């Protein structure tokens, strides 16, 4: 079978990593056919290394390349849905970087376009391939934790300096990025949260703007979640704490799992806590449990796993690890957290009022200081390390 011909739109930090990976032949069934970037210097540098790969400065031209089978979109988030919709209209399969876009209403249109064309649509939620998150999902889905009671995720090890925020004019502005830590770093975690525990019924958000950096958007967030069965949750994230924490704790009727330090710990109760609570004739009692641990030995970033899965889905109909349509879920939580913050921390019931959200977001975009100078720089130092799941 012939290799799929892949086009990449945006060859900045992430797009160039995908391009290198494919060009080096690390993804079976994929050939890097074309790249596109509005930054001519990046294209020129790229062509020096890969002279045989076609290049474009206008994504519309790339999409018209009749040889292409699929595109990977790795440009600033507010451009995601627009480009993906155009790609579907040109009959292409799409792998889209996270987040799907900046507002749920835009992603609803994207999902509609994807459905209508029936093309393969995947999101780059690379942390879904991490063995410990897969294990957590398997345990929750198996029902072995029983009814969920509470989920807490403190993921504050997304530490970023001012230098990072100054590295691209679009970063951390309402018009250029559409948000801060919730739109850039936390989409991975919010996606895993909903992938493992399901969607909440309501959200309260505290999104602290410019608490630690000279930026327009939030860099410190606390979200309260409520689920249909009465379970509650907290999600805390920040780019201003060092050293940070990455600890996910899920508690159910039959025990608890904790993911921290690259280890999943599982306390599995021998009977239902709810039954035990009413049946025990002691005031202070403990329930018998089995304890087990799972360590992750895999050091892959996960991007390769998603790229290979995308290729296999197109070529052989393999089930997608991250279906494109699911990109809307984590964005729903972050949009709701913003709306809650903007409405004096009101509880936002889902589905939320997207029109109200868009109106308030657009007001922020209008007053944004962002002015594209197309001056994003390559974040060379340790950039790759940021893609691993850090503990
Ligand atoms: N999955 C992950 O682990 C991961 C990691 C980093 C970034 N990302 C995502 O990738 C996307 C890009 O982030 P980045 O860090 O690579 O940013 P970046 O600024 O380094 O790269 C973006 C590139 O897009 C180009 N671009 C902008 N507008 C364009 C247009 N209209 N047409 C063609 N090219 C255009 C820019 O010139 C730049 O080269 C973001 O959405 C981000 O969330 C994902």
Image (cartoon, rainbow, N blue to C red):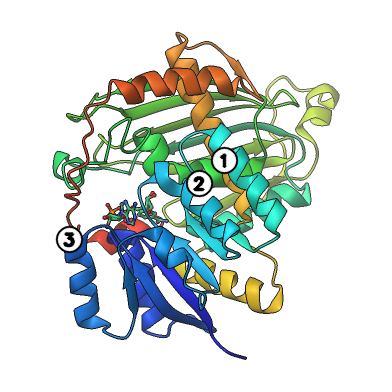
The correct choice, above or below, for 307 with respect to 284 in the image is below
Circle 3 SS class = loop
Circle 1 SS class = helix
- Assess whether mark 3 and mark 2 are in contact (beta carbons under 8 angstroms): no
- Assess whether mark 2 and mark 1 are in contact (beta carbons under 8 angstroms): yes
* Residue 365, position as x, y percentages in the image: 34, 26
Label 3 crowd (10 A; few <14 / some 14-19 / many >=20): few
Per the model, the C-alpha gap separating discs 1 and 2 is: 6 Å
Q: Name which residue lies at 71% across and 60% down.
A: 118
The correct choice, above or below, for 319 with respect to 246 in the image is below
Q: Which residue is mark 2?
A: 81
Circle 2 SS class = helix
Q: Nearer the viewer, residue 299 or 88?
A: 88
* Residue 343, position as x, y percentages in the image: 47, 10
Given the current orientation, which residue lies at the most extreme top position?
Answer: 344
Per the rendering, the mark at residue 107 is: 1
* Residue 273, position as x, y percentages in the image: 76, 32
* Callout in the foreground (3, 1): 1
Label 2 crowd (10 A; few <14 / some 14-19 / many >=20): many
Q: Which residue is mark 3?
A: 381
Q: Earlier in the sequence, mark 1 or mark 2?
A: 2
Per the model, the C-alpha gap separating discs 2 and 3 is: 30 Å
Per the rendering, the mark at residue 203 is: none
Q: Earlier in the sequence, mark 3 or mark 1?
A: 1
Q: Name which residue lies at 65% across and 71% down.
A: 313
Q: Nearer the viewer, residue 26 or 83?
A: 83
Q: Name which residue lies at 74% across and 26% down.
A: 228
């Amino acid at each position: 079978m012939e290799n799929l011909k892949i086009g990449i739109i945006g060859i900045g930090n992430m797009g160039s990593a995908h391009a290198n990976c494919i060009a080096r032949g690390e993804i079976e069934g994929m050939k890097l056919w074309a790249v596109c970037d509005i930054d001519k210097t990046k294209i020129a540098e790229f062509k020096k290394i890969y002279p045989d790969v076609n290049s474009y400065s206008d994504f519309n031209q790339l999409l018209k390349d009749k040889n292409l089978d699929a595109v990977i979109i790795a440009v600033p988030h507010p451009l995601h849905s627009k480009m993906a919709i155009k790609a579907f209209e040109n009959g292409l399969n799409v792998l889209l970087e996270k987040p799907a876009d900046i507002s749920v209403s835009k992603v609803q249109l994207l999902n509609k376009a994807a459905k209508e064309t029936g093309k393969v649509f995947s999101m780059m939620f690379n942390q879904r391939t991490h063995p410990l998150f897969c294990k957590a999902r398997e345990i929750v889905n198996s029902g072995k934790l029983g009814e969920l009671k509470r989920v807490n995720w403190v993921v504050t090890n997304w530490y970023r300096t001012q230098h990072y925020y100054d590295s691209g004019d679009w970063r951390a502005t309402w018009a250029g990025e559409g948000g801060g830590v919730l739109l850039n770093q936390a989409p991975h975690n919010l996606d895993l949260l909903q992938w493992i525990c399901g969607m909440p019924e309501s959200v309260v958000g505290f999104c602290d703007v410019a608490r630690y950096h000279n930026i327009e958007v939030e860099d410190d967030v606390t979200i309260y979640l409520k689920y249909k069965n009465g379970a509650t949750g907290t999600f805390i994230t920040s780019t201003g704490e060092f050293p940070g924490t990455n600890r996910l704790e899920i508690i159910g009727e039959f025990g608890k799992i904790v993911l921290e330090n690259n280890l999943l710990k599982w306390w599995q109760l021998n009977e239902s806590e709810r039954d035990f609570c009413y049946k025990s004739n002691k005031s202070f009692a403990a329930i018998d449990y089995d304890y087990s641990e799972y360590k992750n030995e895999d050091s892959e970033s996960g991007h390769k796993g998603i790229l290979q899965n995308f290729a296999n889905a197109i070529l052989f109909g393999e089930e997608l690890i991250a279906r494109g349509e699911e990109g809307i879920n984590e964005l729903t939580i972050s949009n709701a957290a913003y709306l809650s913050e903007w409405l004096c921390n009101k509880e936002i019931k889902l589905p939320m009022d997207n029109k109200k959200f868009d109106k308030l977001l657009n007001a922020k975009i209008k007053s944004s200081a962002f002015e594209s100078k197309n001056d994003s720089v390559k974040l060379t130092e340790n950039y790759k390390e940021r893609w691993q799941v850090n503990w």
